[in-house]
């Protein structure tokens, strides 16, 4: 039985990844910083990836065949307050992990990057400390892949949605909708606009893509993990309406001069035999079911 080490195992994506790979018959070493994984049938490990000695001990103990590196900080707003913490968590932790994995040369690794990372051009500044930290993470991981001939791939995911404790916009909208159904929310949900476009992908589709990249990806490649279809925030609000018992009040601002992003090209990942399986409506419905099961109250 092969072993996959999953960092950030207690997170939104991490919990889905643990379940997915347990079902695939792998031995799952679930790594988190503060508490053990809530997913059954995994081997839980606590480790602070910013501590070199803890990372080295973790790799020596688990000797993984695969690593899915999900751990890190991902709040853009918070990154302005704690920029060094974001660099340490996203960049240095990744390099500590990859350096420890030099002792396991057969191990195949997927590092989760970000669509918000940037490529500096003509002195252009990064849009946020979070973006800078994820850019450094990607460059460092690709550098280790080339310098030390490690089997490292990058997966850049779009906005992940679906059941679970997500703090993404769809998760927040689903939670607010359930609170409105329960009568514990009367205030409108505030959106920056209804015309902003983003790519949304079910978290379960993303995990399936990570599996394909782990198995068949080419080291040193960056794989986009996305639906390839942009939707407006208004589209998300409209899709939620028929799925809820009480319509959520929305308050939105107006944007002027907005230029929507180009759709994300996903052919490189689809060439590995992957394609999304969940429709947007299914992802939103499952997110609503999750929050209803939590027994949300006004807290």
Image (cartoon, helix red, strand yellow):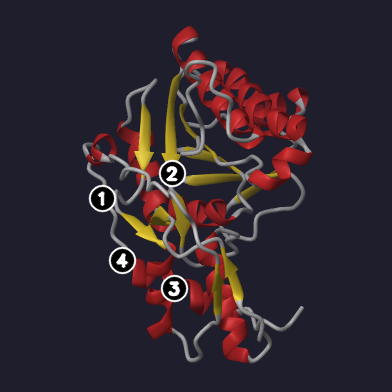
Give left or right: position of 34 versus 164: right
Q: Nearer the viewer, mark 3 or mark 2?
A: 3
In this view of the protein, can residue 23 be seen by the observer?
no
Question: Are the residues tagged 2 and 1 within 8 Å (C-beta)?
Answer: no
Q: Earlier in the sequence, mark 4 or mark 2?
A: 2
Measure how far apart labels 4 and 2 are at the Cα level: 17 Å
The residue that disc 1 covers is 275
The tag earlier along the polypeptide, 3 or 1, is: 3
Sequence-wise, which precedes: disc 4 or disc 3?
3
Q: How far apart in space, not on screen, are marks 4 and 3 (Cα)?
A: 15 Å
Is 180 rendered above or below residue 207? below
Q: Residue at 59%, 60% (x, y): give it.
A: 39
**Quarter residue 137 falls in:** top right
Distance between the alpha carbons at the discs numbered 2 and 1: 14 Å
Q: Which residue is mark 2?
A: 157
Distance between mark 4 and mark 1 Cα atoms: 12 Å
What residue do we see at 70% from left, 34% from top? 86
Judge whether 173 appears above or below 215 on screen. Answer: below
Q: Position of residue 278 (x, y in %)?
A: 32, 63
Quadrant in which the C terminus is drawn: bottom right
């Amino acid at each position: 039985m092969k072993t996959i080490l999953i960092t950030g195992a207690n997170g939104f994506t991490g919990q889905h990844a643990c379940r997915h790979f347990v079902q695939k018959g792998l031995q799952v070493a679930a790594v988190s910083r503060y508490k053990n994984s809530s997913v059954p049938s995994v081997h839980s490990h606590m480790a602070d990836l910013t501590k070199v000695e803890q990372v080295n001990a973790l790799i020596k103990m688990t000797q993984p065949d695969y690593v899915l590196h999900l751990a890190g900080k991902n709040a853009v707003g918070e990154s302005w307050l704690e920029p060094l913490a974001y660099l340490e968590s996203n960049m240095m932790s990744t390099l500590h992990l990859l350096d420890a994995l030099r002792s396991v040369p057969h191990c195949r690794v997927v590092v989760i990057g970000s669509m918000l990372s940037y490529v500096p051009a003509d002195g252009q500044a990064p849009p946020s400390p979070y973006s800078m930290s994820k850019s450094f993470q990607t460059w460092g991981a690709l550098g280790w892949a080339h310098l030390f001939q490690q089997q490292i791939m990058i997966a850049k995911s779009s906005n992940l949605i679906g059941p679970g404790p997500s703090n993404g916009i769809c998760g927040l909208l689903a939670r607010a909708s359930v609170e409105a159904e329960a009568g514990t929310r009367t205030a409108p949900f505030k959106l920056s606009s209804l015309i902003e476009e983003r790519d949304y992908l079910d978290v379960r589709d993303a995990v399936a893509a990570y599996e394909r990249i782990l198995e068949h990806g080419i080291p040193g490649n960056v794989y986009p993990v996305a639906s390839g279809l942009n939707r407006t925030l208004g589209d998300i609000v409209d899709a939620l309406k028929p799925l809820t018992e009480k319509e959520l009040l929305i308050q939105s601002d107006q944007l002027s001069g907005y230029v929507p992003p180009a759709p994300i090209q996903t052919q490189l990942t689809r060439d590995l035999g992957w394609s999304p399986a969940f429709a947007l409506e299914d992802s939103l419905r499952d997110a609503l079911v999750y929050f209803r099961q939590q027994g949300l109250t006004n807290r």
